Image (cartoon, grey):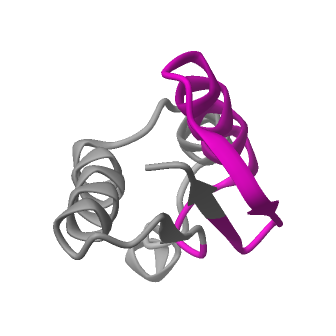
Amino acid sequence: MKNRYDKIPDYKVVKSAMQQELTDKQIEYVKSAIETSAFKNDDKAYVNLISFNPNQKRKLGQILKEKGYQFEEDTSWSIIIIAL
């Protein structure tokens, strides 16, 4: 019976995951979105944030601003980066 409940993650594991930095996969995704937009000569890059937790969204916004990017739109679901 106990094995059935082992599938539920411990609170500490979930809390730790919520405080994590951006994953390598997320960083690669944002890099790809920006590069693809630049290669297409588009002045905007769309980044879907559906797989980002709230802390990761804030961190991404902070990093992009530090790197000089500006946002046309910044919602809880996506970021549209301008002036590429």
Tell me which residue sits at (16%, 66%) in the image.
39
Q: Position of residue 71 (x, y in %)?
A: 71, 51
Tell me which residue sits at (67%, 41%) in the image.
70
Q: Is residue 67 above or below residue 22?
A: above
Q: Is residue 26 left or right of residue 75?
A: left
Occupied quadrant, residue 69: top right
Question: Tag count in the figure?
Answer: 0
Nearer to us in this view, 18 or 30: 30
Q: Is residue 57 above or below residue 6?
A: above
Q: Where is residue 22 in the image (x, y as percent from the top left)?
A: 43, 38
Q: In this view, does 35 lie above or below 5?
A: above
Q: Where is residue 62 in the image (x, y as percent from the top left)?
A: 66, 26
Q: What stretch is highlighted in magenta?
A: 50-79
**Farthest top residue?**
66
Tell me which residue sits at (53%, 58%) in the image.
9
Nearer to us in this view, 34 or 10: 34
Tell me which residue sits at (22%, 57%) in the image.
35
Q: In this view, does 65 lie to the left or right of 7?
A: right
Q: In this view, does 28 lie to the left or right of 48?
A: left
Q: Residue 42 lies in magenta, yes or no?
A: no
Q: Where is residue 26 in the image (x, y as percent from the top left)?
A: 35, 53
Q: Residue 54 lies in magenta, yes or no?
A: yes
